[in-house]
Structures are given as C-alpha cells and as structure tokens.
Image (spheres, rainbow, N blue to C red):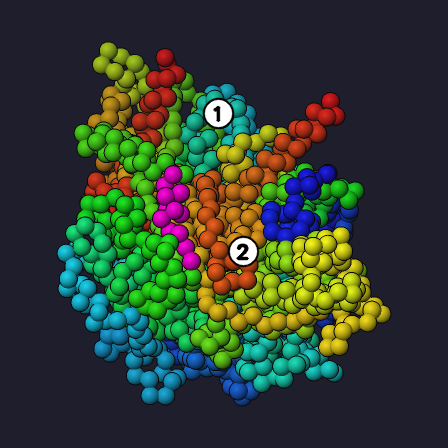
Amino acid sequence: MTAPAEEDVKIGFGRMRRVEDARFIRGQGNYVDDVQLPGMLHLAILRSPYAHAKIVSIDTSAAEAHPKVKAVVTGAVLETLGLAWMPTISYDTQAVLATDKVRFQGQEVAFVVAEDRYSARDALELIEVEYEPLPVIADAKTALDAGAPVIRDDKEGKADNHIYDWQAGDAAKTDAAFAAADVVVKEEILYPRVHPAPLETCGSVAHLDKVTGKLTVWTTTQAPHAHRTLYAIVAGLPEQKIRIISPDIGGGFGGKVGIYPGYVLAVVGTIVTGKPVKWMEDRSENLVSTAFARDYHMSGEIAATAEGKILGLKVNVLADHGAFNGVAQPTKFPAGFFHIFTGSYDYGAAWCNVTAVYTNKAPGGVAYACSFRITEAVYLVERMVDALATKLGMDPAELRLRNLIQPEQFPYTTPTGWEYDSGDYPTTLRKAMEIAGYDKLRDEQRSQRLAWESGERGGTLTGIGISFFTEGVGAGPRKHMDILGLGMADGAELRVHPTGKAVLRLSCQSQGQGHETTFAQIVSQELGIPTLDIEVVHGDTDQTPFGLGTYGSRSTPVSGGATAVVARKVRDRAKLVAAAMLEVSHEDLEWEQGRWFVKGDPEQGKTITEIAMAAHGALELPEGVEGHLDATCVYNPPNLTYPFGAYIAVVDVDPGTGVVKVRRFIAVDDCGVRINPMIVEGQIHGGLADGIGMALMQVMAFDNDGNHLGSSFMDYLLPTSLECPSWELGETVTPSPHHPIGAKGVGESATVGSPAAIVNAVLDALKPWGVTHADMPLTPANVWSLTQGRPLRTDMAL
Amino acid sequence: MQITVRVNGESYTRDVEPRLLLVHFLRDELGLTGTHWGCDTSNCGVCTVQVDGTPVKSCTTLAVMADGHDVTTVEGLEQGGELTPLQQGFINCHGLQCGFCTPGMLMTCSALLRDNRDPSEAEIREAISGNLCRCTGYENIVKSVRWAAEQTAEQQEVTA
Amino acid sequence: MQVPAPFDYAKATSVDHALALLAEHGPEARVVAGGHSLIPMMKLRLARPDALIDINGLTDLAYLRTDGDSLAVGALTRHVDVLTSPLVAEHFAVLVEAERVIADPIVRNWGTVGGSLCQADPAEDLPAALVALGATVVIRNREGSRTVPVRELHVGPYETVVEAGELLTEVRIPIRPGGSSAYEKVERRAGDWGAAAAAAALWLTSGVAGYSIDDVGLGLTAVGAEHYIVPEAEEFLRGKLATEENFAAAGEIAARTCNPAADQRGPVDYKRHLAKELTVRALRRAAGRARVEEA
C-alpha cells in the first residue's frame, strides 16, 4: 500500500501524518498492561462496599492460605511502615489503605499479591472484613449541616466537613454594580460529577531491584517527573534510585495526573515480595475510586442594563471534594482557575466564593480536560449569559456580540486579575455564525414555533445554542504556580548528531496528543531539519529533563516553548560554528530555514547538517564557543496563553420522549499558531464528543447511602459514533504574543467549551414550555421532566 | 483443559482453565498484546477480535469457546509486511490518537469492509457503535474507513 | 480486570448431549451460548454457576426457516442473523426494529435469540417484540419437549419457566396474513438498555368507517409489565377502529397497568408516560405500514 506521503509537510509546521501511528495500527503500542517481567506477580485491591463505616476487624488468614498468594497487606500493616496515609497535592492527607474507617464506597482496604491475576482476584474474596456502617454524607448540600457526621475525624480537632472558603474578585465593587443594574438574573447551576474514563484504566508495574536499590515503575501517568519526586517524598526513597516510565498511555484526560493508592501499593508490593508487581484497575475500580471531575454546585447572579450591557457577575460555589482533598492542580489555587468565570466579556465587577466540603465520595475534582476548573467557569458564565438573554428577550448571539472584549483591548485584565494575552473574539463568533447559517436557522425555528403554537405538535423542535469560551492554559509562571513547591516550568534537551539528525528530550508525556510528531515539527521549524529526522524521547524520567507533565493543555504552551527556545539555542550555537567555518564574523550571518549564510552573499552558507558535522569535528572554534550543538533549557512561561472559541450547537428535541439529537455542531477555535492542524482538529473533535457526553448522558450519581450509581460503562455512559454528528470546524488564528511560536494550547478547549452550547440549545428548543433551567445530563427522562415543570436532580438517585 | 486455537494463521495448543478469558489467552498466553481490554462489561469494544471472521468482544468470550476456531487479531492484519488499506486509512486520516481503541476498531472495520465494500457514513457509524473511542469524536475514524473503501475501489479499477 | 470464579466446562455436541450434561452437572449448571449477559455477571461474581454447558457447537440450532404457518428460529440463531434475515424482514418489521436496538453490532454478532429470552432481563427487547407477534418457544428436556407461549415464558426478572436440566431450542412465530408491526424504544444512548420500549402488531381490515382492528399484539419492556404484555390494552383495541383516539386510549391503559421502577433511566412517571407514548407511536407506525401495504 502506497501512501500519499507527498501530502505531508516535511519541514516545520503544517499537516503531516503522525510518526507514532506506525506502531499503534499494528498493535505494537506498549501500554502498562503490556509490560511483562520475569517472575512478575499480580496485585489486586479489596475495596469498601460501604461509603462510610468503621472497620471493626479484618481477617486475612484464609487469603494468606491460598496457595498462590504471596502477600496480603492491610492498613494496619502499612501503619507500621508509616505508609497508611499519604500527602495529597492539596496539602491534605489520603488513606493509602483504610485503617480506622472507610470514607467512600470503593476505598482501598487491603491488597493481595498473587502469582496470577485470577488468583489475586479469588483471594480478595477470602478476606473477611467486619464493618460497622456509619451515617453517610452523599449530598454536598448537607455536608455542613449541624450534626452532620464528621468524615475526617482522623484530623485532630476536626469537628465538621468544611475544607476551605476561597474568594476572588471585589465584593464591594460587584455589589455596587448590581445595585446600579436594571436587570439581575439568578441561576442555580450544577456541574455534576463526571469522570474522564480513559479507555485504559490506571495501573502500574513496580520493580525494586534489591541489588542496585533501583525502583522502576511503569505507570499510567501524565506527569512522570512529578510522580518521581512525589514517590520520593511519600515513600522516603532516594530520588536518584527511582525511575518512572510512562509508556504509551491509553488516554488520560486528566485522570492520570495524581498519585492513587494503587500506585503506592504496587511499590509496597514489590518491596514486600522482592518481585516485580503489576496492578491494573478494572473498569469499576477506575470509575469509583480514581479522580472524578467537577461536582460544583454554583449559585450565579448576573447584572446588566436594560440594553444588555453586562455590569457584573457573582457566584457562590459549593464544591464537593469527596472524602480527601486530593485535587490535582497548582497548589496555590484551591479552586483551580475557576475565577476565570468572568468569561470573554468586558465588564468591571465580579466576585466569587468557593466553599469546599468533604463528602463520602471518592476524592478528586480536577480531571477530565477541565483546565483546572475552567470548564465549570465557562459553563457558569455561558449559562448565565443565556439566562440573561432570555430575561431580556434578546438573541443570545446579539447579547454576546454586545459584550465581547474587543480586539484593541488586549492585553485585557479581567475583574479577577487574569491578563488575557490576545484575541479577536467578535470575528470568531461571527465566523461560527456564518458557518452555522445562524440567521437561517433562526428563521427555520421561528416558522417551526408558529406551527407549534397553532397546534401542529408532531415532530421535533429545533434548538440553537451558543457558547463562547476563553481559557487560560499553560501553567505556569513559576512564581505563581507550583505543585507542592515544584515550579511549573518545563525542561527540554536537544542534541544534534554529527550527521544533522536530532534527538529532543521532553519532560511532558503524550496520552495520544501526538507529541512525537508535533514537537519534532517545532524543532524542524526552528532548525530546518526534516521532522522525520528528529526523534522525540519522552515518558522516562531517566532519559528526560525535569518538568511537570501533560495536563491543563500545558504541553504546547510550556514544553512547546521550551522546545522552541532550546532549538533557538542550538541555532545560535550553529551560527558561531558556521561563522568559523565560513571565516566570517557571526554578525555577518543571516538565517533562513536550515541554513546560515553571509548577508548579501547567499551562495556562501552552511546547512545545519554541515554545521553539525563541523561542530563535532576538528574545526577550530572561537574561544568560548563549545563544540557540538547540544543545548538544554528550562522554559518558565511569562503568562498563561488564552485560547478561545465560538461554538454553536443545533439540536432536535423530541418533546414526546425527551430525546435530544445533536444535528450539527459548529466549532471555531482560535488556539494561536497551529503546529499541525490535523492534530489540532483531531483534539477538537474528541473534546466535542466529551461535550455531547457530559451534556446528554454522563453523570456519577449516588444514592443516600453513598452507593455509586455509575460504576460501569453500562451506567456511566460514553458517547458512541451514533450520538456524534459530523463536526463542522472553523478557525481563526490570533498568535500568543508572548509564546515563542505564538501557540496557545488546545487539548481541552472543546471539552471546556462545548457542554454549554448543547445545554443552551436544548433550553432554546424548550422555550415554548417556558423552561429556563436544566442541569446536565439532559437524558430523555430529564428533558421530559423539564417539560412537566419537574426538573430532575441529576446528581442523586432518581 | 487443552484447547487448540488458530490465531492469525498459526495453531496454538495450550492447557487452560475454563474461566480464562479469550483476551487473556491472547495477551498473557500468546503475548499478543495488541488486543486491549477496557471495560469488563462488553460495552467498550477495545477487546474486539475476529472469531472465524466475525467481530467478537474477547473480554466476554472464554478461551475454551475459541477452541477449534480461527481468531484474527490486529497483529494478523498486515500481510507480508504490507499494511491493509484500512490501516493506511487510519494513518492518513488521523483515525487514532492514544491508539487504545484502535486495534478493536480495526477488527470491526475490517469485517465491515469485507462485507460491504462501499459503506456509507451512516453504515460506518452504525458498525462502530459498539467500539468506544475517547479521543477522536469518531469523525476521522469514519473518514479512515471511507478512505480505505475508496482506495480499494481505485485499486480494483486499476487491476481491472 | 474482573475475572470469573472457577467453574467446570463442557461442550455439548447435540441437544441430547446438552441435556445429559445439564443433568450430570446439576441445578447450578448454566447453558452458555453468546455469553454476553452471563459472562459479565460471572466476572462481577454476581453469577457463580458450578458449570457452563457450551452449546455453541449445536449449529443445528442456528436456523431461520418457515415451517408451516410459522417462522421457526433456532435458539442458537445470532441476533445479527435475525436482523439481516429476508424472511424476518418480510413478515416481522417489529422484530427487525427490536433487533436493531439490542446492545451493539458486535454483541449482536455473538448474542443469541435463546440466550436473550432465557436471560429474561426486565429490559430485554426481544420478549416484547415476540409477545406482540404471539410467538411460542419449544423447550426440550430428557423426556421430550413442550411448547410455551412467550407470554408465559417469563415469570419474573431473570426467571423463566425453563427448568434446571431443560433447554430452550426454538422460537416459533406465527406468520399471519394482513399483519403489520413496529417497535419503539427510548434509550439514553445507543446500545443502552431502554428506558422503555413498546412493540405493536396489528391485523387490520379495511371498511367503510376506516380500518378495524381484527387482532393486536402489544409488548412492553423495561416498565415492569408482567410477562412484557398489556392484555387489557389489547382487549380494548380488538374490534375497534385503528384511530388516534383508540391508540391513545390503549396507551393510557399501558401506562396505567405497567409497574415501572425508578432508576437512572428515569423516574416512574416518565416511564409510565413512555409506556403510553411509545405504545401509541408503535401502533401508529404499525397501522401506517398496514395502509401502505394495502395501497
């Protein structure tokens, strides 16, 4: 089979097929569960069936007697090693194995290591645990009630379930803006608990070499270097003796950032048995115990003039953090970047309060392509703006166009202190409206509603919904952003071999983003070396420089910046070498892609390949100029980058059944310069499908006993090919002024931006019922209930 | 019990427990780790292989049920070092990102193309509705299959 | 990954052999064909059979053929073969439409008609379609065989009259001239169990006043209708005209007489509403088909 190779851009930015695909389409990827080591044992975890219960006793004797079992470990055993509890990224603690009591259904209680995975599972059934059930907090709204059971009684002096209150913005100024407003609209908005649910669950293979003392861990992590340092801190192991390998990862979406008890247990397993130990979650374990996302109960108020000029926005959030505060985000931002909730509009006053509470649910909160809670922020503001449009009787596109920040206002400082770097918002929204045929759609809807009002009520109703989002991604400037004191800058190393081929070593880690292609393209763009001549090494802490990993859409903004800068360092060195080769002053040289030449005499020049060989050769270099062309750098971003976009969803709602069909979805994204447009578009497609999932079907609900009602893919629904329309994409390009290549990051944009468009569209369709509010997911039952004036509480058992 | 399964054209005889799942037989016994698993409940389709040419979810099939049958996995697609048009289509049209669902998708789609040389977008979407993908939003998977169908049609025209 | 607990396993080579194996392994043995419901339950360790009797080798139970006035469908017939059968398409639109929304295409490749019926999930699509068509099943045991209407096959969630040691071998669907049928299902997502579904089969006669209903079969699933049936609504419709008013009244009866339970697919009032709405829609489409055919 010959491929249209001529369509690939060979050097620099542009569409090219991915180099990593060669292994994946042959089934030759190497994921954690593919790792097989001689003598490897298998670990399985016993989990709590209760959401809140005292552990009275654990009897492991029958499990220990199983002929294939090598070890059975309980919390009591870990306690003796000082490993029963571990610190979380949010300066809380989390039980590695429960000792005193269990605090959520699915919590880790004990583990077994056995010769094979079937025996390990069998042995779990032989462990007898006696529990004494305790009252449960399943609903965050009751967590702060007087007399509520105290979930974290392990914390000395803790007498309630309160974690923190956190504010941003100017309350007095916001109150003044509201006082002056003609119109104020209030909405209670829930962003329910969802889960990133990558198709590969979490897992580890841990191997402690007793002779060398080296611990090697193959693990599903988006942040191998951060994991290494945290293992060193948690387990007290010397960091130079820890090697984290993050091989191919079957999707992360933010669910593979934190350190889960299972990872630590695999390390304990190898220490205890002296053998390599593999732990792979099953799907249910993945859904019930690893990081959920959102669970924000938001009370929003928006103020405006009668003409539709927004004056202010305020919001009170009740944040359900689960039983341990384990959110994976820059440590100084307890509510993540939620305070970007003012959105893409120009107004002066905003304020938020976030109150976080413990509940008897799994820990987490920041995961699932959320850009550290910008998902919740965008959903809030885009729902509030639509609610305002409804109140004012204005077209939601018109209201947005009246309030969008104008291009000449950039850099723009928001009322909560963000400095948006660049953008042309009205152009992007107009482009989306043009692709959608917005006016025509509204005409179609008008005639449909007239028919509806005259009694023709057979068919479906069209709804049109808009969402305009701005994200801040690429955490981040190290003076503001760190994770447990680790600054969020990324290293990069670039070696150019004598023959002009190169190796780039990156700290970030791909879970499908195509780093092996795009980062090579950045080097290629900067040095003129063909992309296919550049090897990208990542995902192995022994082979790559330190950096904080891939999440929060930070790879291109941070590691991409590092890559451009390190390539420029090589180019600068090459200039000095070329000057020596050409026997001219380096000041007389000029660069064109792949070559230094003498100004005014383009014939006289040296290619990067020639320079590379000379740099390794006998050429006499000027004093102070090192040989070779290798360079390293650490890129500390000066600011976040601010991608944005305009999304329009067109839905058909069947009022007789409540079924929603997304007929069209238009997405115009501006993520600055696109390194490989093919990959950018692919990431947007995936995020839009996430939006369909969250808006229409995905939720983790609980009953009052804390039972998880979405613990398998039978109940936690992911969109299939049949719910997704053929996506209609457009683009605008507003480069980031401070990023070395003007790129902004796009991995999470569509997940962040799309849910509000769909919910707004469904509410638009339901206007004949006077429905103004709905919570996700808009399942058929929920939509029908809305038309009956009885919206469902989607986060609790029906 | 002893079973003999032909996998990608080669015969393997192994002594297995009746409860061994086909996916584990392929991955752990034969080292064919191209077939993944993702959900336990036969909802995600990443474990899809072909048994006697029919796409089947191997996490819900016992290895003993494959005794005496022909199993094809992703590793068996490439013939004589040549990628199939379908595999090439997935590369050309960016039909994969993390690659985890890809082997199952390929096994489903190769059976589709065998039975229907010119599937419409709707037919492709229906055929892959039991194979979840979290990365691509399905758009480019549909394009990949279309590419393979068109490529095959072109090749046949040339041959004719 | 979840894995089943240990069990014994035997491959049956004939129906008699299967029955002998079932007798040999006792009441805790289960028959496995497609296994797409049973094996996940075993992995979750919610089902723990002592033994599995694999009937996949009984290829003589995989058939679709006319037999007198009936379509005979072997228990081992895969869903995909029902879905793509020209015979089924010719006579039973409701069955095609129900099959199309059972799980997903890969599960339909492997899952069997007999398996779906014996699994008896309260949200199973197949029983609703088959009760509407007045189908029967043949159950074999070592003494011989008996025929049971699908309307009497299911005695509760996951429970049928197929006893330990017995094997459901065939489904027989009467082919009655003048019939038309349709299936309506609401699901949260493709491949999900239904929030509710309704099957309707109509036998109409055209008259001066319009179409009168000679006979009707209705099936409901996922809404707690005992035996998946709505006899009161059928009784109401028989002999009446095929009008929107009568369909609506039948829908009301369906809503009133079913007994749904709330779950994450919807609250009780929603499911009752669907029982009505989907019954009406299925009747409407079935009637529409009858008219088209006659024209």
**Vertical placement of residue A544 versus C270, above or below:** below
Q: Nearer the viewer, residue A373 or B125?
A: A373
Kind of residue indicated by mark 2: Leu
| Magenta region | A422-434
Q: Residue at x 22, y 77 (%)?
A: A146
Question: Is residue A414 visible to us here?
Answer: yes
The quadrant of the picture occupied by the C terminus of chain C is top left
Question: Is residue B50 visible to us here?
Answer: no
Kind of residue indicated by mark 1: Ala
Q: Nearer the viewer, residue C234 or A690?
A: A690
**Vertical placement of residue A727 versus A686, above or below:** above
According to the picture, the residue beneath numbered tag 1 turns out to be C89
Residue A33 x %, y %: 63, 62
Q: Name the subunit of mark 1.
A: C
Residue A79 x %, y %: 51, 86
Q: Are marks 1 and 2 on the same chain?
A: no
According to the picture, the residue beneath numbered tag 2 turns out to be A199
The answer to which quarter of the image holds residue A343 is bottom left
The answer to which quarter of the image holds residue A432 is top left
Is A430 in the magenta? Answer: yes
Q: Residue at x 60, y 66 (%)?
A: A565
